[in-house]
């Protein structure tokens, strides 16, 4: 543990962080975790505030996990600024920040992994090979380090949340997974650490994603039940709005993420694609 | 939870077992687990006694895990007698017994798994395809259900223990893994639930395994350092002693299980093969 300008104790050594969390739990306290890759924004801070409602001790991990970046992705240029992150966390008096080096998380000899379920093979799984196995493995590690009673994940990464819920259920992990609503800029853009890659012109064009998703939800609210037609129109809206590429634009079951023909009682619209060179994702619950 | 003739509360529903373990931990108590497949014998009871030294609450799981049996193995005929197991446990006043049905451990939709490290690919991994992934996955589930502070495994399944230790380290599981020495019959045969498959004649011939292992250890104690020669002689002793097949007979590093040329400071001899139709395994630490 080392001190920092923030009031939150920062742990660089996973074993020391784990010992602290175990000590809290042996004193009867519940530990809640907010796993992040840093580059914190208001969306993350909302997760921290929500976490506080579920537990006695709030811990935040800040770790740009190399194993969840597919080859050619933005691992090297992903924004990293621990001091800025700690400044942002200061008002929330978190009880611990885990900020390990990659070599502390994946030391020599490391060779196990958590293999995600079938839900990881569609959508992001098709466009980011290995991504979700990187996610499930690092989240299993982080939850194990904190022995977390609860962990908060943002709806923004909806499939990630679904994959993690599947893992926690399948492996009987003693952690409650809570979904926090997507935090949006006033104009609707979903907050993301990757938004800072956008030029002003791209930032403006990126608004098409939220607009298309909200239009889709409005149509469902107005009674539309043909999910295939909604998906076609969602795609068309994205094209018309100037997205530079579209990886997918689907209407899917909220649990299995399988594409729907007809809107049921748990439908979600999911979009991924590029604006300029930046890959953005977003989603909206259509029936809740 | 249902009552039984034993004083130990028996849990058939994993979630109820997990809730009980969490409640103990929130009261500041340490939970220790002894995972078993039932068909308990004195070796298992020794694990239970050892577990008591490490924790406030001792739980035992009795679950013949289908996913760790390779195709064609003895899953169907593996001995099952819960009442007899509970009778054997009675003197130890264990705090809970988890005895779930396979469908409670692997319900519909189940699809995640824990992929073991490279150490799972040699020895047993070569002869029992899928075995260790079944082991790591079910052990992760059981440790998650108990949120175990400590778990006890027998040295008899040495590679299993090494695979589990690798998993716990790699995934930062908050559980201490303790190895209990192999329990042997007075004549040296390692205790195993599968010994009951042996005819009296096979039971006698099976003694060759322990005899060959102890002879190997004696030679190391006397100064022999050529691990390849020791392995050849180990194999020859097994053949001469009447084993019906030998899957492997190796001298390996105690951590990585890679075959050794020269005895170092952590060497183990491992044997697997058949006597009659029964597959037996055994091992002996050569330098500790």
Image (spheres, coloured by chain):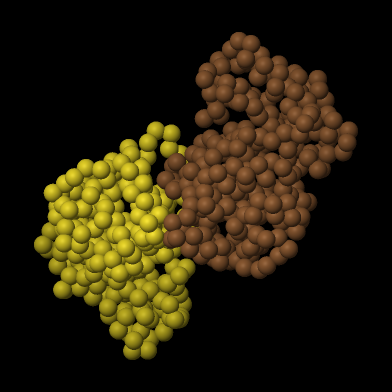
Chain colours: A brown, B yellow
Reply above or below: B11 against B265.
Answer: above
- B237 and B264: which is toward the camera: B264
Reply above or below: B250 against A184.
Answer: below
On screen, residue A192 versus residue B41, left or right, reads right
Residue found at the very far top of the displayed protein: A223
Q: Where is residue A266 in the image (x, y as percent from the top left)?
A: 53, 23
Marks counted in the figure total: 0
Quarter assignment of residue A85: bottom right
The C terminus of chain B sits in image quarter: bottom left
Quarter assignment of residue A236: top right
Q: Residue at 65% across / 19% down in the picture?
A: A217
Whether residue B232 is visible to the viewer of this picture, yes or no, is no
Q: Residue at 43% across / 34% down in the picture?
A: B109
Q: Residue at 33% across / 89% down in the picture?
A: B222
On screen, residue B83 versus residue A266, left or right, reads left
- A22 and A172: which is toward the camera: A22
Q: Where is residue A162 in the image (x, y as percent from the top left)?
A: 55, 36
């Amino acid at each position: 543990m080392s001190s920092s300008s923030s009031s939150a104790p920062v742990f660089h050594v996973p074993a020391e962080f784990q010992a602290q969390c175990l000590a809290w739990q042996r004193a009867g306290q519940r530990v809640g975790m907010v796993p992040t890759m840093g580059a914190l924004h208001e969306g993350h801070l909302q997760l921290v505030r929500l976490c506080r409602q579920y537990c006695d001790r709030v811990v935040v991990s800040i770790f740009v996990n190399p194993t969840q970046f597919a080859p050619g992705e933005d691992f090297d240029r992903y924004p990293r600024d621990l001091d800025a992150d700690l400044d942002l966390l200061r008002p929330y008096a978190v009880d611990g920040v885990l900020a390990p080096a990659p070599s502390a998380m994946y030391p020599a000899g490391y060779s196990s992994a958590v293999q995600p379920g079938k839900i990881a093979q569609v959508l992001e799984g098709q466009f980011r090979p290995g991504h979700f196995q990187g996610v499930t493995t690092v989240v299993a590690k982080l939850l194990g380090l904190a022995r977390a009673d609860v962990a908060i994940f943002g709806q923004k990464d909806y499939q990630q949340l679904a994959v993690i819920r599947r893992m926690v259920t399948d492996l009987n992990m003693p952690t409650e997974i809570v979904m926090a609503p997507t935090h949006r800029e006033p104009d609707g853009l979903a907050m993301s650490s990757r938004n800072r890659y956008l030029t002003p012109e791209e930032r403006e064009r990126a608004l098409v994603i939220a607009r298309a998703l909200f239009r889709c939800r409005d149509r469902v609210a107005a009674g539309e039940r043909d999910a295939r037609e909604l998906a076609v129109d969602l795609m068309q809206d994205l094209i018309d709005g100037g997205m530079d590429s579209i990886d997918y634009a689907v209407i899917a079951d909220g649990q299995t993420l399988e594409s729907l023909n007809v809107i049921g009682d748990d439908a979600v619209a999911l979009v991924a694609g590029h604006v300029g060179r930046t890959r953005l994702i977003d989603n909206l619950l259509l029936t809740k």
